[in-house]
Image (spheres, rainbow, N blue to C red):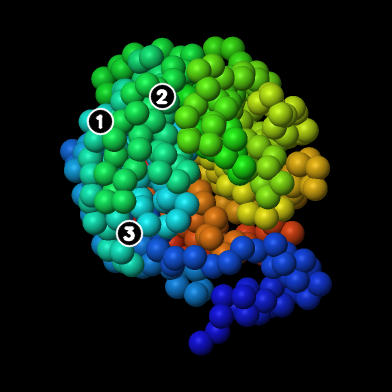
Amino acid sequence: MQSPRLFTASVAIALGLTGSAYAQSSAVLPHADSPYIYVMSNDIYANSVAVLKRSIFGGLDKVAVVPTGGVGVGVGTTAPPPDPLGSQNALLKSDDGRWLFATNAGSNQISVFAIRGSQLILTDVVASGGSYPVSVAQRGNRVYVLNSAGASNVAVFELNANGHLTAVVSETRVIGTDQALVGNQPNVGMTPAELQLTPDGQWLAVAVKDASAKGWFELFSVDRHGNLAQDPTITPSNDPQPFGFAFDTRGHLITSEAAGSAASSYSVARDGHLQAISSDVANGQAAACWLAVSGRYAFTANAGKGNISAYRIGESGALTLIGNGVAATLESGAAPTDLKVSPDGLFLYVGNSLGGDVDSYLILPEGQLFKVGQTAVFPGASGMQGLAL
């Protein structure tokens, strides 16, 4: 059977790409991990997670759907579909691949699953420590949850060997937004979008949207026990809505910007301030909300145009838009609401909430995308959001 790398090489050759270009791209790919991909329904009546298995060719097969024990919010009430959560990393796999964490925004709960091959075993469902949980970060036995409605906060939990979470109430930190629920959803243009630890584990970064002015980032120092500093270091964003973000291999923070449909990059200073490298590199599309990094490339999912943009990341962290800003176009009427790169760096997976499916792309040299499949997961336009690998 052909290996994924040989398959990638053969496709590259078929598309007329040079051997040196392929070698340069594949040299930065990490080791392969689990073949399973997880998608969250965010169902308004009973939230669940679908388990999809990836073939060596990048296609997906749905093998199971497992209830979270909590409730999602469906399509939401204050913003049009397809973005009810206004966040990234609503579903997260642990660093060691043993656990899966799911947010239940409708019931203010976090669910924990033990990953056993193709099986998910529910081990705990706990209160999220706030209102409207939308994003999760994890390092070791510490789990950090972003609650985005009301007085938004970061709630901290201890994870034990049995997959149970215990709240560390003294570690709760308030974020500077206060958006009431209208129906079952806050104004997601004015809420925190994501939290994530820096690669060295020294900072917990939070992206905060403010559609009425300018957004910002809050970075909390993290000590060796996983405890957070009382006060964050705050860096303003040029864009009102910094949204999804990820770190490249050199520790640069790469973020999407929804208002300007752009991307920016930053270095993290020793005091936690972000220093701009590339600012507001527009892709010419609309609503660049979710972002994924693969080696020297970053990809944004543009909900307003139903397409994907690709950027090249230089050694310094500088961003360059690739081509005309459209690396791939989803089917007519689609609206991407998340995207993630496979652990081996070969494939990009894009969640399409309006269609209820996941589109699969092979990542080719120079950041090009080649579609290899589409898999139905949940009913279309029902609020599906959250993708983890």
Query: Answer yes or no: do the residues labelled 3 and 1 have beta carbons within 8 Å?
Result: no
Mark 2 and mark 1: Cα distance apart in space = 15 Å
Under tag 2, what secondary structure? helix
Q: Where does the image place residue 193, in percent across and percent down from the top left?
A: 48, 29
**Of label 3 and label 2, which has the lower sequence position?**
3
Is residue 346 rendered to the left or right of residue 349?
right
Q: Where does the image place residue 14, in percent across and percent down from the top left?
A: 69, 77
* Closer to the camera in the image, 387 or 369: 387
Reply above or below: 7 against 37.
below
Residue, far front: 224
Between circles 2 and 1, the one closer to the viewer is 2
The residue under label 3 is: 115
Query: Answer yes or no: do the residues labelled 3 and 2 have beta carbons within 8 Å?
Result: no
Residue, far bottom: 1
Q: Where does the image place residue 163, in percent across and percent down from the top left?
A: 29, 49
Q: Which mark is residue 61?
A: none
Under tag 1, what secondary structure? strand
Q: Which mark is residue 171?
A: 2
Under tag 3, what secondary structure? strand
Query: Answer yes or no: do the residues labelled 2 and 1 have beta carbons within 8 Å?
Result: no
